[in-house]
Amino acid sequence: MQIDSISIVARSPYLVLWSRLGPYDPAWLDDLLVRRQLFEYWSHAACFLPIEDWPLYRRDMLEEHKRAYAWLEHNVELAERVLERLRIGGAVRSSEWGREAGAKSTGWWDWKPEKMALEALFSTGEVMVARRENFQRVYDLRERILPHWDDDLLPTEVEARRGLALKTVRSLGIARARWVPDYFKRPVKGTAELLERLAAEGLLLRCEVEGWEAPGYIHPDYAQLVRQVARGSVRHEGTTLLSPFDPVVWDRARLLDLWDVHYRIEVYTPVARRRYGYYSLPILHRGRIVGRLDPKAHRATGVLEIRQFHLETGVEPSPDLVEGLAHTLTEFAAWQNLTTVEIGWSDPPEFAGMLQECMLP
């Protein structure tokens, strides 16, 4: 799950879980990190990852991140001072170091030197994130968090790439070769050949999909489910909202392939050029991306404001969609401890009124 700090509503990793679980206690995610069932590291971006995947990333820590190694090589004394602080004092946040008077920006998001050291040591695997406090990273030595890890257990480069490819296909459900590299930010070169080898070994299944010029791939764990889908015996149920960083939509090319939906987050788009809003969330309804909405949580007043709605081209505001989305918005607001949902502008114009009326007690 990609980590992002934008909190216009729920922060992304918590929203990703809500989309799948419905109302849950967000402390669960924090607790999984503390209990060492998750770890943080760079995947396709900064992510929460299952601790079982640590060996698959350890090779990256040792062989990639040349910038971090170069920085550490030129700042040996500072890095050792930070490590000594961790050895003696235990886990630490970067904010526990003050900025020296007159210190200039480092160029790395205006980080303090100690923060730069912590991040470089994090990239090389010498320190890990022990927990988060107010969503700030709390760093500790790797040997405290994973005391039994030994680099002799390191998988080979081939083993790591095969393992991540299998996890990618399993996570995507069905995969085209061109979708696979982006999931864990692996090299594009050789991906198609790797998938064919895995299929030849029986570790993946090939499938034909109407309109695809090349085979798709399915993990054997889902063979029975795919057969049921092909027979038409699986119904798509439910309505939910997706984070802009949800695994369903973060690969914009895959989203376009599957649903013919063009989507981008407009956080960094100038206000005058925004079309769908600052933090628009895709709406998933019965297996389709049917629209997007731009929310804002006003926590002081207990209001979930939906500043604008857009339905995708060709999607009608059917009673089924209105009812499903009204229930989802009510449930989402309650999960965020908000008591009221206020809906602004919508396209089509009548959709906002239909939703608001459906949410009346």
Image: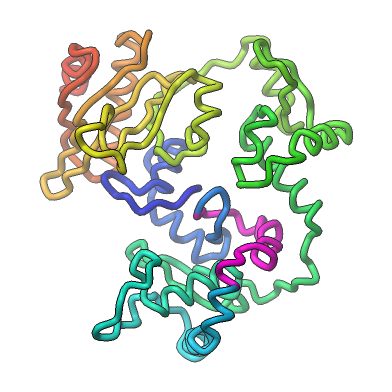
- In the displayed structure, does residue 148 sit left or right of residue 319? right
Q: Residue at x 59, y 75 (%)?
A: 126
Q: Residue at x 73, y 33 (%)?
A: 219
Q: Position of residue 323 (x, y in %)?
A: 30, 17
Q: Residue at x 69, y 65 (%)?
A: 63
Q: Which region of the structure is painted magenta?
A: 46-69
* Position of 340 relative to 93 (above/below): above
* Position of 197 relative to 286 (above/below): below
- In the displayed structure, does residue 128 sit left or right of residue 290? right
Magenta stretch, main secondary structure, is helix
Q: Position of residue 178 (x, y in %)?
A: 66, 31
Q: Quadrant of residue 128?
A: bottom right
- In the displayed structure, does residue 249 sit left or right of residue 332? right
As for residue 49 lying within the magenta part, the answer is yes
As for residue 115 lying within the magenta part, the answer is no
Q: Quadrant of residue 69?
A: bottom right
Residue in front for this viewpoint, 50 or 102: 102
* Position of 51 relative to 239 (above/below): below
